[in-house]
Image (tube, rainbow, N blue to C red):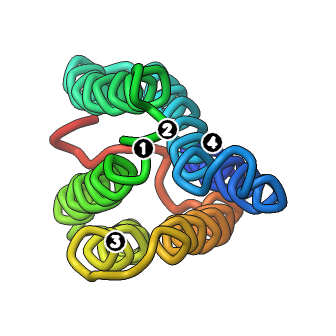
Amino acid sequence: MRIVQALQSLAAFSAAIVITFLQPQRDIIGVAFIGVLGLMVVSVIAAISHVVAAFVVGTKNAILFNGAIILLLAIQIAAQVASLTGADAQTNLPIVFPYLAASWLVFGGLAILGVAHLYRKTSRSHKDNTITAIIFIVPGLVIGLMPVDLVTKVGLLNTAMIFASVHLAICAASKDATTSTLPKGLG
């Protein structure tokens, strides 16, 4: 089992659970609040997965690469916390959520696409990362660019988390031909 992909699957699964099971309270706490909570859960556990990745590989390049991703996730988490705790949070959250979700999904997907490019010589890792990137980028673009309602935007985030969770769990459980979790240049 690939531990980093298993943790990333757990991150997406946890976000999907939060979004799905808080839906009955959406009239009380707000749809955007539920979406931001889901983003916070996936961001925190994804950051932990990158700490693990840095230690598993243990090279200077892996530490720098994963450190950069952790820094980006920390910025995203700070924006999420700020959106929840501001004085006008209840009013601004429905406006801010689509930007947070779209940026998380699109930039995360582009980062994964970059990793897929680094893995282009190992077809399985290239394919796995490309699929994960598409799972993030497509709903991220719809959330960011299409004029759909807030419930649909949170639903698209939830759908991306569900599909990513299943895909990453399958990848983590698949036989791994290599022992490295990063391509030669980073590992």
Quadrant location of residue 60? top left
Task: Report whether residue 73 is seen.
Answer: yes
Is label 3 in a helix, a strand or a loop?
A: helix
Question: Closer to the observer: label 1 or label 2?
Answer: 2
Q: Which residue is mark 3?
A: 143
Whole-number angstrom distance, CA of label 4 to CA of label 3: 25 Å
In the picture, the disc for residue 7 is 4
Going from the N terminus, do you reach mark 4 or mark 1 first?
4
Is label 1 in a helix, a strand or a loop?
A: helix
Going from the N terminus, do you reach mark 1 or mark 3 first?
1
Q: Is residue 126 left or right of residue 175?
A: left
Asked if 61 appears above or below 119 in the picture, the reply is above
Going from the N terminus, do you reach mark 2 or mark 4 first?
4
Whole-number angstrom distance, CA of label 2 to CA of label 4: 32 Å
Label 1 crowd bin: few (<14), some (14–19), many (20+), radius 10 Å: many
Q: Amino acid at mark 4?
A: Leu
Q: Nearer the viewer, residue 184 or 139?
A: 139
Whole-number angstrom distance, CA of label 2 to CA of label 3: 20 Å
Q: Position of residue 94 (x, y in %)?
A: 42, 53
Q: Nearer the viewer, residue 94 or 67?
A: 94
Q: Residue at x 25, y 55 (%)?
A: 115
Answer whether labels 1 and 2 touch (C-beta < 8 Å): yes
Q: Amino acid at mark 1?
A: Leu
Q: Amino acid at mark 2?
A: Gln
Q: Residue at x 18, y 58 (%)?
A: 114
Going from the N terminus, do you reach mark 2 or mark 3 first?
2
Q: Which residue is mark 2?
A: 90
Is label 4 in a helix, a strand or a loop?
A: helix
In the picture, the disc for residue 111 is none
Q: Position of residue 127 (x, y in %)?
A: 37, 77
